[in-house]
Image (cartoon, rainbow, N blue to C red):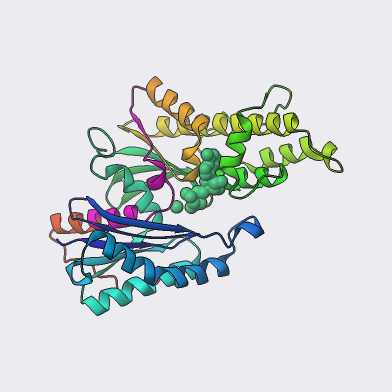
């Protein structure tokens, strides 16, 4: 196998990476789109246009950073879903074009699968990440517990019935008058707040299964803020509510993941991925939970936790290897549509 060039464009990050067949990262680039900031959330059409504007240059930049000519590539991969369709079409279009021009296979990668397999990148988790393990994926678009049983073998144990965890952080940030994306701003403000005067509910806490719900929590935050609608929001109030909200999310997620581990007694490891996994309160909770079960806890470094192309390249390599091991013909997804 020769190096794989991978593209990620499913949301608001345009990313490209080149990986050697053993998973060594030869180059990685990412551009986080800023055109959404005035809108307080990702605008799909702006995202698609920005991917199209950025991607060809980013591909060239990534090849230069790896010091490779395009003809040295063995395959081209792109995430083809789930995600915002405009961006996926751009990423798949650029990837397929490159694959055709180079006469190499194109590999379509499922974005969730890419998050799920990241922990197996060589060197990331001490001792590797042998199957099966439990993945908690918590981002702006996704919130689910997945039993990762093998390459191509995933079982969704539960997911959100309304908002994703990151979406809840972003909406609460907006209510508190903070910028977008809201998660890091809420976490920073929570550090100076006292949660005690601002009790908030924990939807689905203690219920069977491991589904998530955040919309009632969000409404409860809005109710706490209602008395301040017409005046300035005192900083200690904002900080207290931010701290209480963050505690509630950590409690909810901790409880749901504990149930997911009950549903997966053979799990050898707990892995967290997605932008919200950057939250230190949540990481601490998950770490404690895993320790109490005698399991290791791993969260990839932030740049590999949020959307990136390294995970797409790695998932493509794992898929190619798994097919090879089974004696199946090599993948070529040129006909596959996002
Ligand atoms: O994985 P990601 O970069 O993109 C996708 O949504 O796919 O995740 C972004 C989400 C946003 O909702 C952002 O507010 C949240 O992750 N986030 C955080 C933190 N950093 C990012 N949420 C809570 N605490 C953080 N430190
Ligand atoms: Zn993602």
324 or 30: nearer the viewer: 30
Question: Where residue 329 sits in the image (x, y, percent)?
Answer: 16, 66
Question: Where residue 123 sits in the image (x, y, percent)?
Answer: 24, 39
Quadrant of the snapshot with the N terminus: bottom left
Q: Quarter of the image holding residue 321?
A: bottom left
Residue most toward the right? Answer: 230
Q: Residue at x 36, y 52 (%)?
A: 113
Question: Where residue 98 sits in the image (x, y, percent)?
Answer: 29, 74
- Report if residue 115 lies within the magenta region: no
Q: Residue at x 64, y 48 (%)?
A: 179
293 or 4: nearer the viewer: 4
Q: Residue at x 60, y 45 (%)?
A: 182
Q: Residue at x 44, y 34 (%)?
A: 260
Q: How many marks?
A: 0
Question: Where residue 13 sits in the image (x, y, percent)?
Answer: 46, 58
122 left or right, relative to 283: left
329 left or right, relative to 153: left
77 left or right, relative to 289: left
- Report if residue 311 lies within the magenta region: yes
Tell me, yes or no, if residue 298 can be seen here.
Answer: yes
Residues in magenta?
293-318
235 or 197: nearer the viewer: 235
117 left or right, relative to 212: left
| Whether residue 248 is situated above or below residue 303 in the rendered picture | above
| Whether residue 35 is situated above or below residue 167 in the rendered picture | below
Quadrant of the snapshot with the C terminus: bottom left
Q: Quarter of the image holding residue 76?
A: bottom left
Tell me, yes or no, if residue 212 can be seen here.
Answer: no
């Amino acid at each position: 196998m020769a190096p794989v060039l991978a593209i990620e464009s499913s949301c608001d990050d345009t990313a490209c990476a080149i990986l050697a067949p053993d998973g060594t990262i030869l180059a990685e680039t990412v551009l986080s789109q800023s055109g959404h900031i005035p809108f307080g959330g990702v605008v799909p059409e702006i995202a698609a246009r920005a991917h199209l504007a950025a991607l060809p240059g980013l591909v060239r930049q990534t090849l230069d950073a790896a010091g490779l000519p395009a003809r040295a590539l063995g395959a081209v991969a792109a995430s083809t879903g789930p995600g915002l369709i405009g961006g996926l079409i751009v990423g798949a279009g650029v990837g397929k074009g490159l694959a055709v021009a180079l006469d190499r296979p194109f590999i379509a990668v499922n974005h969730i699968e890419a998050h799920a397999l990241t922990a197996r990148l060589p060197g990331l988790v001490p001792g590797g990440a042998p199957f099966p393990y439990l993945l908690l994926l918590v981002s702006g678009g996704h919130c689910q517990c997945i039993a990762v049983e093998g390459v191509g073998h995933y079982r969704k144990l539960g997911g959100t019935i309304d908002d994703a965890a990151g979406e809840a952080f972003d909406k609460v940030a907006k209510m508190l008058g903070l910028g977008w994306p809201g998660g890091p701003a809420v976490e920073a403000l929570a550090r100076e707040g006292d949660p005690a005067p601002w009790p908030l509910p924990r939807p689905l806490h203690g219920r069977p299964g491991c589904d998530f719900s955040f919309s009632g929590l969000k409404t409860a935050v809005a109710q706490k803020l209602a008395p301040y609608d017409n005046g300035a929001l005192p900083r200690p109030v904002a900080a207290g509510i931010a701290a209480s909200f963050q505690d509630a999310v950590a409690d909810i997620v901790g409880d749901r993941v504990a149930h997911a581990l009950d549903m997966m007694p053979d799990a050898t490891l707990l892995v967290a991925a997605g932008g919200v996994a950057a939250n230190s309160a949540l990481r601490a909770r998950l770490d404690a939970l895993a320790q109490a079960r005698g399991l290791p806890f791993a969260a990839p470094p932030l740049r590999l936790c949020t959307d990136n192309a390294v995970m797409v390249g790695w998932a493509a390599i794992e898929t190619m290897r798994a097919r090879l091991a089974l004696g199946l013909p090599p993948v070529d997804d040129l006909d596959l549509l996002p």
